[in-house]
Amino acid sequence: MQTLKRILRISTLKGRLRLWVGLLIAAMCLLIVLFMSLPVKVIKEREIHAALKEAIEVQRHFIDNWKAERAADVDYLASLPGSRSLQLDEMSRQIELFRQSHAEFDSINFVNAAGKMYSANGGGFELDVSDRNYFTAARSENRYVTEVMTGRVKGQSIIAFSSPVRSYSDEFAGAIVATVKLTTLEGIVNSFQFGESGETFLLDHHGYRITNSPGGSEVTEKGRRYDTEIYKRAIAGELTSKAYNNVNGEPVFGAYAWSLDGRWLIVGETRTVDIYMPYWKLLVVMGLISGLVLLASYAAALLITQPVVDLLSALLQGTNRIREGKYGYRIDPATFRTAPIELKELSANFNMMSDKLQSTVQLLKESAVVDHLTEVYNRRFLMNEGAKIEEASARAGKPSCILIVDVDYFKQINDKYGHLRGDRVLKHAASLLVACVRKSDVVARYGGEEFIVLATNCDMSHGRELGERIRKWFLRSPYREENLEIGVTVSIGVSQTRPHRTYGTNTLEDMIERADKALYRAKNQGRNRVECDDASCEPEP
């Protein structure tokens, strides 16, 4: 214990760096292994459950559609003229033509109103099926799909579809009964498998297996009771991704879905050992790699300790300078003249980042107050700094004016010449405004095609003169590009500071609101004009 304390109390940076680098690398390797064994395992289980659920849902839709299509086929046969007219020869011919294009049906027969099944092979009405559910359902004017049952004629597992036949006098005349071998359904079910070890099968509502797996045993599989966890979940309507033991006692992941009529439970299962096997192999490989990385990294740390210590000292000094606001601070390259090339590059990268930081900070300062398109001040600068400028002018006892300049019919320019050329027109308008005003005036883009000029030491009459000068300057300065010339006019609203506010929270907001109302009048009165919010300010003749 005392030795451990002495080790942990290493006073030199070099010793501590070696110790903590080793511990850090070991911890990282351990975390990687833990990450692979815990969160990845959970994620993998969720992926498996989602994939199983999706596959089962697809199969449920497929089976439900298959049942609906077979039932519709039987309805179609029951509605044929030969069936409704009870012309047995014509009925047999139509059924035979239908079977040629619907090979999935094992047999298609007609049962008369007395429950006798007609044999098209010359036997007439022989087999009595009046006690069968499919016939009693047909006699009640309902279509019917049976559970899996054993056929009386061939002794095979079949599913029967029945539909009532009504004569042309609209009386019950019998039923069309079509059977499909269970092997057909098994082929559909077994065509959906999840991975190499996955299995999909059907259970009835009581948990007895209906379908057989490919190559499976009729004795051990079909008809077997599945009182397993997945069946209990299905009965209870529970949805969980936890593994459970299948009917053979093997840990599996599973998903289920009930058919639309609620008779069949579609179950998909895959063994956990087959899912986790690649994961465990990867985990072993990751453990070995982590151990090798630990040894190699610690050996490398011993070799580069001293240069790293020197570099850390230089970086610490540099970061302190940057924290003090000296963003252009540089590390002297001569310090690392004999250091490994990586440390030289790190030093050079620090200097590059310091230079980049200095330029970025400067750019951010500019972009925070300058509109990127027109290169005049933006609305944020106007509302923050403009208010301060106006307040300073007011304290000096000098009036200020706000001019809102709106480019007339700018939407038509955009629609006719395109947005890119419209942007260039806005940039042209901004340059004209800057050329028209004093250096002490503030020009800002207020939004869209609207600009604001804040003119200090300027009363209403001078503000109107400035507005007229701007308007006429625009008239004389159309936008030109190659062989294209676009005339640009502006409407301008002017307001002056007042002792008392009517709008907003400060004098600047009040001036902007009043100038905006004056601009509204200018636009309503035909555009290309200057309007003041002061009625005493008359327009030029």
Image (cartoon, rainbow, N blue to C red):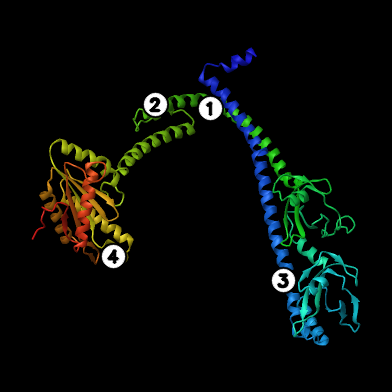
**Amino acid type for the residue under numbered disc 3:** Glu
Specify whether 128 is left or right of 521: right
Residues at marks 3 and 4, CA–CA distance in whole angstroms? 59 Å
- Check disc 4 and report the residue beneath it: 412
Rendered-image quadrant of the N terminus: top right
- Helix, strand or loop at label 4? It is helix
Q: Amino acid at mark 2?
A: Asn
Looking at the image, tell me whether mark 3 or mark 2 is earlier in sequence order: 3
Q: Note whether 34 is above or below 419 in the view shown.
A: above
Frontmost of labels 1 and 3 is 3
Residue lying at 22% horizontally and 57% vertically, measured from the top left: 520
Within-10-Å neighbours for mark 4: few <14, some 14–19, many 20+: few
Asked if the residue at tag 2 contacts the one at tag 3, i.e. Cβ–Cβ closer than 8 Å, the answer is no
Quarter of the image where the C terminus is located? bottom left
Give the quadrant of residue 111.
bottom right
Task: Give SS at disc 3.
Answer: helix
Is 89 left, or right, of 236 in this rendering?
right
